[in-house]
Image: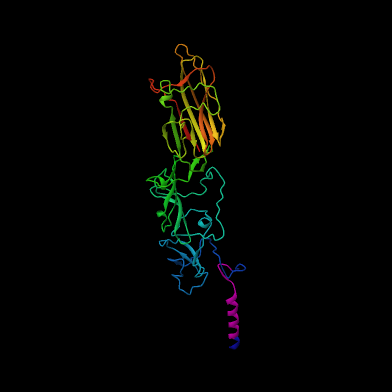
């Protein structure tokens, strides 16, 4: 009897450590269980369960071991149908996926059933694309909305779980690309829009589109000849226009002969005494004093454009007047432009008039004194400004504009 018991226990030990083969007498090396189907039309049925929460062991008992394999057969909870194994309380249920359904490798289409997140930690996520007949590079990464009445975009959330900014498109087709940066909000849709770009190529600053805006700008946004938006220090627009008083015309009481030989410091034409308008006298204004109609004082540095239009009348044959700009800076006179004389007075068969028109652009400094000089270029004789009392009236004038 004792010998029989000893043999039985010895045989039990051999069986408990041996490989098991079902459908085969030769289990493969390294296998504990080897199953073969001689007909090739059968499989193994893994226990089916309904997983409702990937983070808990349920519906299995709490003592279930790591590595337990089940098949989730219902997806009503948003958890996909398929094989899952229990990996412990830290990571929970993990799905076994094939190459077609493994969305972590973005090889197959799919739908996520709940909110997901990707932690890249100290790494980065890069998308590489090679243009083909189906992908031109711009559509390497696509976010598509299925309802054009909805907004669509990408939001940026800070560590406090509030949204600081977002980029997206507004509702409806052909809508604007919008940049949202105003506010620190719990919901991305509450961030205010700062900038919008529409399909007509228009740039819209949403914060400044309506209402009264107070304060003085500091900078201008300009577009250069390369189509680039550049920032320039803000410069308040300035224009002014001055005209000859009628008293200096051919019909005036104090006629001014402009056909005199040039003498340094004289020959200044009275163009600044009659102010038609002046946007800002703090930028430029006529000089004060007895001869204030002769000089324009520059009060701010800048680039200025002068447009001069003068009409003359004479009863002397072959008279002609040279007109040019005189710049007085720190007491020294200079002549930075050209001499202009469009035509001369023939004084024959009623040809008694002439004119001079020109434009000059000068870089000027605060304190510069600008005068317009008229000097004899041909025969001697009186040449006067034509009168505004003619029909139609003629007014000689100068237009001043600060460019920058």
- Asked whether 133 or 174 is in front, the reply is 174
The number of numbered badges drawn on the structure is: 0
x and y, in percent, of residue 114 in the image: 43, 60
Residue 327 lies left or right of residue 190; in this view the side is right
> Is 140 located above or below residue 15 in the figure?
above
Q: Is residue 102 visible?
A: no
Q: Which residues are magenta?
A: 4-24
Q: Say which residue appears at 56% left-offset and 48% top-offset.
A: 129
- For the residue pair 40 and 251, the one nearer the viewer reads as 251
Q: Main secondary structure of the magenta part?
A: helix
- The colouring scheme, among rainbow, by chain, secondary structure or one colour, is rainbow
The verdict on residue 118 being magenta is no
Give residue 32's quadrant in the image.
Answer: bottom right
Give coordinates of residue 13: x percent, y percent.
59, 79
Q: Residue 11 in magenta?
A: yes
Question: Residue 354 at x, y = what percent?
Answer: 47, 19
- Extreme front residue here? 290
**Depicted 193 relative to depicted 329: above or below:** below
Residue found farthest to the top: 349
Of the 4 image quadrants, the one containing the N terminus is bottom right
Answer yes or no: is residue 363 visible: yes
Using the rendered view, name the quadrant where residue 78 is placed: bottom left
Indicate whether 157 appears above or below 215.
Answer: below
Find residue 215 and report its horizontal and vertical position in percent. 42, 47
């Amino acid at each position: 009897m004792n010998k029989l018991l000893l043999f039985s226990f010895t045989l039990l030990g051999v069986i408990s450590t041996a490989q098991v083969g079902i459908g085969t007498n030769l289990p493969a090396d390294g296998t504990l269980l080897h199953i073969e189907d001689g007909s090739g039309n059968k499989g193994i049925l893994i226990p089916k369960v309904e997983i409702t929460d990937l983070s808990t062991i349920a519906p299995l008992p709490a003592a279930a071991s790591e590595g337990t394999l089940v098949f989730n057969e219902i997806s009503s909870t948003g958890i996909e149908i398929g094989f899952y194994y229990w990996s412990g309380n830290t990571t929970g249920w993990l799905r076994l996926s094939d190459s077609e359904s493994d969305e972590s490798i973005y090889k197959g289409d799919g739908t996520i059933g709940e909110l997901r997140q990707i932690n890249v930690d100290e790494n980065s996520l890069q998308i590489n694309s090679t243009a083909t007949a189906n992908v031109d590079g711009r559509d390497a990464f696509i976010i598509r909305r299925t309802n054009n009445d909805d907004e669509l975009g990408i939001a940026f959330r800070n560590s406090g779980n509030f949204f600081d900014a977002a980029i997206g498109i507004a509702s409806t087709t052909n809508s604007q690309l919008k940049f949202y940066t105003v506010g620190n909000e719990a919901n991305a849709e509450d961030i205010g829009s700062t900038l919008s770009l529409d399909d007509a190529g228009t740039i819209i600053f949403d914060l400044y589109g309506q209402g009264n805006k107070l304060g003085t700008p500091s900078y201008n946004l300009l577009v250069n000849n390369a189509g680039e938006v550049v920032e320039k220090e803000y410069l308040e627009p300035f224009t002014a226009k001055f005209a000859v008083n009628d008293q200096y015309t051919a019909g005036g009481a104090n006629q001014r002969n402009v056909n005199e030989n040039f003498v340094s410091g004289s020959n200044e034409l009275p163009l600044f005494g009659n102010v038609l308008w002046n946007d800002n006298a703090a930028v430029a204004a006529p000089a004060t004093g007895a001869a204030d109609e002769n000089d324009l004082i520059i009060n701010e540095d800048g680039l200025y454009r002068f447009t001069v239009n003068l009409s003359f009348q004479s009863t002397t044959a072959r008279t002609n007047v040279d007109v040019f700009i005189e710049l007085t800076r720190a007491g020294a006179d200079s002549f930075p432009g050209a001499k202009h004389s469009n035509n001369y007075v023939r004084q024959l068969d009623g040809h008694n008039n002439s004119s001079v028109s020109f434009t000059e652009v000068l870089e000027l400094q605060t304190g510069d004194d600008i005068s317009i000089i008229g000097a004899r270029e041909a025969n001697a004789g009186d040449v006067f400004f034509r009168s505004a009392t003619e029909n139609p009236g003629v007014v000689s004038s100068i237009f001043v504009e600060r460019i920058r």
